[in-house]
Image: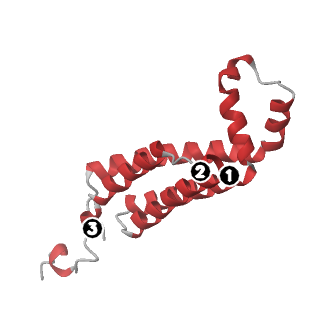
Amino acid sequence: MQQFDSNKDLNDNERPVIRPYFLTLLCVLTLISSCLSVFSYSFYSINFNMLQEMLRANQIPIQLSWMKDSMEMLLKAGIGFFILSAIFNLSAIVGALFMWNMKRIGFHIYTISQILLIITTQYFIYHQSLPWAEILGSGLYVGLYGTQLRFMR
C-alpha cells in the first residue's frame, strides 16, 4: 500500500493556510464595528423622517439632549448619507469575511469601502475640513491589514 503525504501532493493554492492571530483580531474588530455601523445607519435610514420630526418638534428625550447638535448635523446630511454609509460598511464586512478566509481580494474590497466612506462623509457632512480622525483610523486599519497580505492568497 502506498503512503500518501497530503502536503506533498497539493500545490500552493490548495494547501490550507493558517490565519495569523493578528489578522484574526483585525477581522473580529472590523466585523464588530462594521456590523454595529450597518445596524445604526440602517436604523437612521429607516427612521429618518421620524427622527427629523422629533428634532423639529424638540421632542428629543432628556437622556439624548447632549447629542442634539450632532443629530442635527447628521440629519442635515440627508437620508442618502445613511444609506450609502450602511452599504459601504456592509461591503467592509464582505471584505473582512474574505480576509477571514485568507483571500487577498478582501483587502481590496475593504480598502475601497474605507475610501468610499471617507468620501461620503466629506461630501455629505464636512464639505470644507477633512475628517482627519476618520482618515487616520481607516488608514491605520488598512495599513495593519496590509502587513497581513503576505499570508493571504
Residue 54's spot in the image, x, y percent? 83, 31
What residue did someone put label 3 on? 16
Q: From what the image shows, is residue 75 above or below residue 117?
A: above
Image disc number at residue 61 = none
Q: Quadrant of residue 73?
A: top right
What residue did someone put label 2 on? 121
Residue 7's spot in the image, x, y percent? 17, 73
Relative side of 80 to 147, left or right: right
Q: Quadrant of residue 111?
A: bottom left
Residue at the far top: name it. Answer: 62
The colour mode here is secondary structure
Q: From what the image shows, is residue 108 above or below residue 135?
A: below
CA gap between label 3 and label 2 equals: 39 Å
Q: Secondary structure at mark 1?
A: helix
Q: From what the image shows, is residue 132 above or below residue 120?
A: above
Q: Quadrant of the C terminus?
A: bottom left
What residue did someone put label 1 on? 81
Q: Please state which of the two labelled residues, at mark 3 or mark 2, is closer to the viewer.
A: 2
Q: Secondary structure at mark 3?
A: loop
Relative side of 152 to 30, left or right: left
Residue in the picture at 65% in, 22% down? 66
Relative side of 110 to 64, left or right: left
Residue 90's spot in the image, x, y percent? 57, 56
Whichever of labels 3 and 2 marks the residue nearer the N terminus, that label is 3
